[in-house]
Amino acid sequence: MSATNPNKQEIVIIVIGLTGAGKSFFVNAATNGQNAGAVSHRLTSSRAPSRLIPLPQDVDGNIVQVVDTQGFDDTNPNTADAVTWRNITNQLTRIRAENRQRLFGAIYLTSFPNNRVQEADKKNLKTFLLLYGVNVPRTVVLVSNRATREQHDELVQLDPWKSTIKDGGQDARFCGDRGSALTIVEKAVRRIIEDKRGIEINEKLITKNLKKLGLSEQEESEKRRSLWKRFLSWFRPS
């Protein structure tokens, strides 16, 4: 796995997905137990501080670090997805500022045992593609967690998974062990090295699109509150 590499790169892999998708567990497996404090079986985002966690070994002579991120569709009603995206973007901006030569890639994790993919999962994968530029499909691995082979094959035939793979993305199935996690990270790293660019972090464009996303979520939230108030009014005495 290690090799002398005169063109050594520093690669950062972010792991993203819904709350409860198994992101922290995946990162812990890939980094040989260095993320154990963040692993939780609850459907709330990990509150452990996000940090760069080095892979125990390099990949083809390249230094690799993995980042566990806050989850989407959190059970905490005060945690809007637009805020989560903003937090992730700020985190990546800080990491890039430390070393502008770093190349970024991503692993998008989709969890089973549910027999169908949640609409929130589809929405957030589409948002990721929107926010981080046209190069995202060539730098992302779409990973199913706890899925049977049949479930995985069905997943990658759904959009936006299918269209992302058509545009250059890769897919993989996480089997829950360290070897499986490392293979997936290595797949992401090698594609980024081939691409030579990685995920684009255009702060102005991301901020602009986040404002649109935040407004949309605010409108949806207000609509839900309005419907709930109307529902309660039916039971109030006149």
Image (cartoon, grey):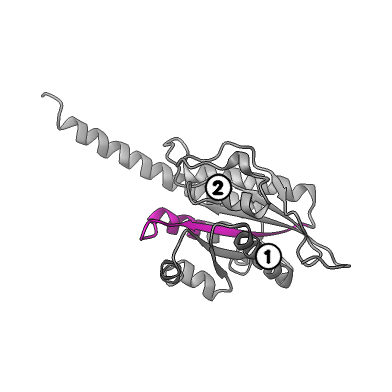
Please state which of residues 73 and 57 is positioned toward the viewer in this rendering: 57
Q: Position of residue 155 (x, y in %)?
A: 43, 67
| Point 45% across, 45% down: residue | 215
> What is the three-letter code of the residue carrying label 2?
Trp
| Structural distance between the alpha carbons of marks 1 and 2 | 25 Å
- Residue farthest top in this picture: 237
Please state which of residues 175 and 118 is positioned toward the viewer in this rendering: 175
Q: Tell me which segment is drawn in magenta.
A: 102-127
Which quarter of the picture shows residue 167? Answer: bottom right
Q: Is residue 123 magenta?
A: yes
| Point 37% across, 45% down: residue | 220
| Point 56% across, 43% down: residue | 39
Q: Point out which mark residue 85 bears.
A: 2
Q: Position of residue 103 (x, y in %)?
A: 73, 60
Residue under circle 1? Answer: 186
| Point 52% across, 50% down: residue | 22
Q: Is residue 138 above or below residue 132?
A: below
8 relative to 34 in the view: left or right: right
Please state which of residues 99 and 64 is positioned toward the viewer in this rendering: 64
> What is the three-letter code of the residue carrying label 1?
Glu
Q: Give the mark nearer the N terminus: 1 vs 2.
A: 2
